[in-house]
């Protein structure tokens, strides 16, 4: 297996873990009535500790020699991705379900490449403009209800797009650091920093959130599963991005859309009592997702 093939496989693992994590998140939100902020906080801690445990025995990985600029880059990206981005993502899932959130979330790839052009010096061309408008058209199709002949553009859709923008900002900020540091270590520290920044808001808004016994073992198992999926997904993605580049990883990660939709539909068919919100305009939403995927692939040809 060539290095490029191996790291492409890492992205597939990342997409599978991400899809499972999104559906688990929707189950926690709808069936167990756990808040988006609490899910983000707990899953960050579990995912961060899961990633850092094996790296602590590796003496070659150290943070003592990091310059202040590396720490600043990690802090900014942690706030953008692992704190604000996750809370927005989970809030969007609560409003519109995991499938539609995943479909709209792929606009993140367009944002990543646009920000990479501005801050990382990548080229921008007429093809990029065409692909950007194509992606915007795909987002419109995702939200189009053919039965009512109208756009379903509400709070959940806006939150999803805003979350994608936060993720893309954090990814572009983090990319230079991942070129120099261990991806698993950086991701683990980033997840814990995200939890640290969320803690004051959780204490202020949910003072009873620390009563773990009130959740029940099934809810705790769901949160633990979400944390493990989170750690696996971001570690494999960040490790692959170091070798494949931000743009190529964004394109390969598109598989998460169809994996999420498939998994949500299967789980909803097997356990409708969980209350998963499968898009009513499923075929139209998938068509919009394909248009967005085409747009990202079109951009990638020029990167």
Image (tube, grey):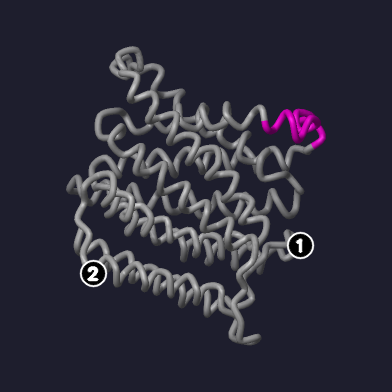
Is label 2 in a helix, a strand or a loop? helix
Q: Where does the image place residue 176, in percent across and percent down from the top left?
A: 28, 35
Which range of residues does the magenta coloring cover?
A: 201-214
Q: Residue at x 38, y 55 (%)?
A: 111
Q: Where does the image place residue 184, in percent across and percent down from the top left?
A: 38, 32
Q: Residue at x 43, y 41 (%)?
A: 234
The Cα–Cα distance between marks 1 and 2, rounded to whole angstroms, is 46 Å
Residue identifier under label 2: 127
Task: Quarter of the image for the C terminus: give it.
Answer: bottom left
Q: Where does the image place residue 236, in percent across and percent down from the top left?
A: 37, 42
Q: Residue at x 45, y 25 (%)?
A: 52
> In the shown orientation, is residue 114 left or right of residue 107?
left
Q: Earlier in the sequence, mark 1 or mark 2?
A: 2
Residue identifier under label 1: 273
> In the shown orientation, is residue 283 left or right of residue 217?
left
> In the shown orientation, is residue 57 left or right of residue 2?
right
Q: Of residues 175 and 19, which is closer to you in this image? A: 175
């Amino acid at each position: 297996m060539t290095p490029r093939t191996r790291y492409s496989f890492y992205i597939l693992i990342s997409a599978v873990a991400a899809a499972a994590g999104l559906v688990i998140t929707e189950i926690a939100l709808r069936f167990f009535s756990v808040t988006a902020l609490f899910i983000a906080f707990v899953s960050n801690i579990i995912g961060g500790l899961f990633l850092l445990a094996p790296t602590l025995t590796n003496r070659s990985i150290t943070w003592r020699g990091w310059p202040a600029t590396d720490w600043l880059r990690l802090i900014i990206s942690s706030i953008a991705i692992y704190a604000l981005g996750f809370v927005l993502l989970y809030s969007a899932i609560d409003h519109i379900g995991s499938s539609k959130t995943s479909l709209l979330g792929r606009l993140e790839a367009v944002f990543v490449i646009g920000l990479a052009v501005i801050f990382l010096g990548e080229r921008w061309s007429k093809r990029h403009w065409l692909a950007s408008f194509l992606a915007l058209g795909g987002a419109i199709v995702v939200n189009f209800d053919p039965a009512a002949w109208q756009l379903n553009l509400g709070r959940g859709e806006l939150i999803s797009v805003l979350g994608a923008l936060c993720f893309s900002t954090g990814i572009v900020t983090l990319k230079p650091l991942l070129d120099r540091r261990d991806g698993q270590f950086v991701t683990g520290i980033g997840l814990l920093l995200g939890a640290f920044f969320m803690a004051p808001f959780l204490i202020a808004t949910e003072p009873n959130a620390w009563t773990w016994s009130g959740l029940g073992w099934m809810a705790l198992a769901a949160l633990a599963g979400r944390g493990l999926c989170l750690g696996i997904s971001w570690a494999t993605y960040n490790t692959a991005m170091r070798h494949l580049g931000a743009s190529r990883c964004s394109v390969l990660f598109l598989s998460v859309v169809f994996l999420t939709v498939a998994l949500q539909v299967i789980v909803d068919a097997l356990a409708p009592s969980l209350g998963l919100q499968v898009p009513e305009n499923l075929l139209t939403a998938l068509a919009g997702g394909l248009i967005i995927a085409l747009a990202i692939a079109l951009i990638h040809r020029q990167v």
